[in-house]
Amino acid sequence: MNPQSAADAPKPQATAILFWCSLIVVSAVYLTIPLISLFADIFRVSASQAAWAGSAFSFAFAGGGLAFGVLSDRYGRKKLMMAGLALLSVTTLAIGTVDALPWLIALRALQGLAASMFPPSVLAYAMEMFPARKRVTIIGFISTAFLMASIVGQLYSSLIVLSFDWSYVFYILSAVYLASFVAIVFGIPGDKNGSPQGGFFAPFARIGYIFRRRGLPIAYIISGTLFTALVGYFSTLGSYLSGPTFGMSHQEILWVRAVGIIGMFISPFDGKLVDRFGIKPVLCGGLALAAVGLGLLGVWPNLAFLIVTSVVFTTGVAMALPAQISMIGQLAGDIRAVAVSFHMFMLFIGASLGPIVAVYLMDLGGYLFTFLVLAGLLALSTVVPMFIRLGEAPAAAHGQAQHSA
């Protein structure tokens, strides 16, 4: 589909609506990270068992995102965004009523499927409905929302449980999703997709093409390790700060997490870095910066030092993620939309593994060991771009990546 003309493009408030909805939908991935120890106490299970409340969501979110990214071509971007928010409102409300861990895990998986309808649809909508001169900006805002969600989701659930029962985390959010559904219905114009052609499974055949493009399959190694490290970091940080070294309260941990947002504001400007230095240098630089910040995090038990290294880590992630999308977009060529959907699939497979890996590593060797192993994953990922050949100029590649989204 061709992008809309400037006259038909969404109004400025549509950018705010898409940013807001992207933020609150992806925040659901991270809601339960601060609640793992609480769930372990309430349901009388181990921390590793309670961590499945997060991992079940992420696995469903990853698989659903790949499927719905393809199906949005068939049924329309706005329709899938609406369906996702409507189903999120229902499933999120139901989660607040559970009294057993298996039900919590099952409903979190359904919530993950509902949420997975939104991200691939909103990226495709932004590309198709906004004129070229605004496209980079709106996709930058959406990408920033996805990153900020990793902290905002935790902040929200942490704040609610300070004053209310944990179930209110989901009751309140259910109402927010319902209001956001109304905002999407009336606040953004409809897209021109939604005219099914061919059989139902025909669009899925394109997924196999990504494994035939040279360099593309190994690029997904970075997609997986990036969010394994990010979510593993958040899972470890809360336990580290509340432990004997710092002995911080729930509210104090909340503000330490919030400072990490500072590093994420570099994401909308990543395109300029790519234009100037090239995709691979920015990607490797971001991964290396994230690895350094994460590796140093547990070295010195000083709060100011920990906050600085946390910001270094999140800055590196915010640099690496858009550059990674740029590289995948260039490698994929005419299958960019499917390739970026698979990238998101791998991101949230990593997000699913993050809490499990973090709990295992903490049991095995403690906090410093966990931070170092996760940093080592990022450091090893910096080698991957060296085996990938990019054939176009950085600026062209960046433009393609924005188109792919």
Image (spheres, grey):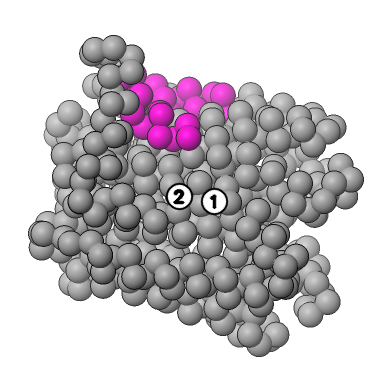
Question: Gap between marks 1 and 2, in whole Å?
Answer: 6 Å
The stretch drawn in magenta includes residue 281: no
In the image, is 123 to the left or to the right of 289?
Answer: left
Q: Are marks 1 and 2 in contact (CB under 8 Å)?
A: yes
Q: Which mark is residue 351?
A: 1
**Dot 1, crowdedness within 10 Å: few (<14), some or many (≥20)?**
many
In the image, is 158 to the left or to the right of 267?
Answer: right
Helix, strand or loop at label 1? It is helix
Tell me the kind of residue under disc 2. Answer: Leu
Measured from the top left, where is residue 341 in percent x and y?
35, 40
Q: Which mark is residue 347?
A: 2
Helix, strand or loop at label 2? It is helix
**Dot 2, crowdedness within 10 Å: few (<14), some or many (≥20)?**
many
In the image, is 171 to the left or to the right of 353?
Answer: right
Q: Residue at x 65, y 35 (%)?
A: 108
Give residue 8's quadrant in the image.
top left
- Numbered range of the magenta stretch: 63-88
Tell me the quadrant of the picture where the C terminus can be found. top left
Tell me the kind of residue under disc 1. Answer: Ala
Q: Is residue 311 visible?
A: no
The stretch drawn in magenta includes residue 76: yes
Q: Which mark is residue 135?
A: none
